[in-house]
Amino acid sequence: MHQRRVFPVTSGAETERLFAKNKNEAAPESGLGEAALAALAGVIAHSRAQNGRFFGYVQGSAEPVAALGDFVASVLNQNMTAWRSAPAGVTIERTVVRWLAEAIGCRRFTGTLTGGGSAANLMALAMARESRVPANDRGMFGSNEAKAVIYASEQAHMSIPKAVAMLGICRENLRYIHCDDAYRMLPSALDRAIAEDKSRGRKPIAVVASAGTVNTGSIDPLMEIAEIAHAQDLWLHVDGAYGALAALAVPEKFRGLSEADSISLDPHKWLFQPLDCGCLLYRDPEIARKTFTHTGTYAKQLSSDPIEGFAFFEESPELSRRFRALKIWLSVRFHGLQAFRDAIRLNLDQAQHLAAAVRSRAELEVVGPVELSAVCFRHLVSDQATEQQRNQFNLALLKKIVSRGNVYLSNAELKGKFCLRACIVNHLTTDADIDGVVPEVLANASEVVE
């Protein structure tokens, strides 16, 4: 790996000095003109710009044609409330949503683009609540509806407990289900939990399955969970923000995905689109309208035509919405779905290649499965090291790696083990970038030991 920094090594104090020199300073009354643009060089220099060695978090790499589409969308500045305010934009978004649904094997699903998976998950659980314990008009309090329960695995994304809190269901009514050794929800544990809650007079309403957990990329047994959800009349939401789009390349891993009532996915991850661009797919648009319709007279539709009278705000909490679909539409038309399918397959292969490189070193250990493209691993320090010593060492190691700026990793904690985590969701990553990860880790480990 080239010993040059590809990520800025900066501190909070330094960025404050550059971009917020005086926290009490007011916005300038007189414009700086072209001189204001000079600061952009500093902004770029202190950003974590995308390149092939960015393995932190689950973040796509903003491919250039999509970035052009995003620029044009900003210039056009369409408000995607309804067809009458953005005829081309709404038509394109509805087309793109259909493309996404078909691409992951969920034909006949419809939906809407969102700011990301967190917003999509919130919308999905609002629909789940309204379909099972309607609360829009009278709320969740003072009735049996207050005992509504939602189920998710121990590995559920943090947006799920946030959503149940915001929806008034409350986090006490979010029940976490145990996982197997591969960090997948155990259907038998889910079945038992539902039976226990029913026996206590509680009302199970929904289950959230994961199609790619944020830590390890594990995929819950979707078909088995769907069978339980259907038998118990629960809404099934699949959080596929990380992994669902990998169904383009490895559909066999996602058996049962089409049985969901709703699915979240993020084109700004594995379709390599610029932020922000999430999506919520759902089976029944009538439930979306039941959940989100509340129209002021100023927004009343003037046409009953199914095309010209369409309004996204009738199926979404948002009124003002940007033209997110243009970048996907332009990008997919330019490259074709096969190019994205190939890029996803390459990322999956690269993750296996990295895991093999980690396993080839006695001082390193792969922690957890490599189901998609997330590889969690750690330095063992020595045979005599305690778990606490290993956790402390790997924390220091991660900080050292990031400070050198040659590769960007993130972290995960699995069963009390602090891990380095490389997540490969990047069309810019080459095999040479992958081959450089282990040497960079070992070089930094030597410095930490010293």
Image (tube, helix red, strand yellow):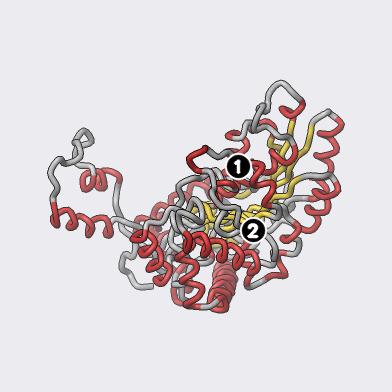
At a point 48% along the width and 40% down the height, the residue shown is 298
At a point 74% along the width and 33% down the height, the residue shown is 148
Which label sits on residue 110?
2
Which label sits on residue 332?
none
Q: Quadrant of the N terminus?
A: bottom left
Which three-letter amino acid code belongs to the residue tagged 2? Thr
Q: Is residue 112 above or below residue 106?
A: above
Query: With 101 as the anchor, is 115 left or right in this view?
Result: left
Q: Is residue 445 above or below residue 143?
A: below
At a point 58% along the width and 38% down the height, the residue shown is 294
Which label sits on residue 292?
1
Residue 164, located in which quarter of the rendered image?
top right
At a point 46% along the width and 67% down the height, the residue shown is 437
Query: With 405 as the anchor, is 311 left or right in this view?
Result: right
Q: Secondary structure at mark 2?
A: strand
Name the foreground residue: 335 vs 402: 335
Residue 327, located in which quarter of the rendered image?
bottom left
Name the foreground residue: 277 vs 317: 317
- Counting from the top left corner in percent of width and height, residue 31 is at 14, 47
Name the foreground residue: 21 vs 373: 21
- Counting from the top left corner in percent of width and height, residue 89 is at 47, 61
Which three-letter amino acid code belongs to the residue tagged 1? Phe
Q: How many marks?
A: 2
State how far apart marks 1 and 2 are (Cα): 15 Å
Q: Is residue 84 above or below residue 67?
A: above
Q: Secondary structure at mark 1?
A: helix
- Counting from the top left corner in percent of width and height, residue 29 is at 15, 40
- Counting from the top left corner in percent of width and height, residue 403 is at 35, 55
Query: With 18 as the anchor, is 333 left or right in this view?
Result: right
Nearest to N terminus: mark 1 or mark 2: 2
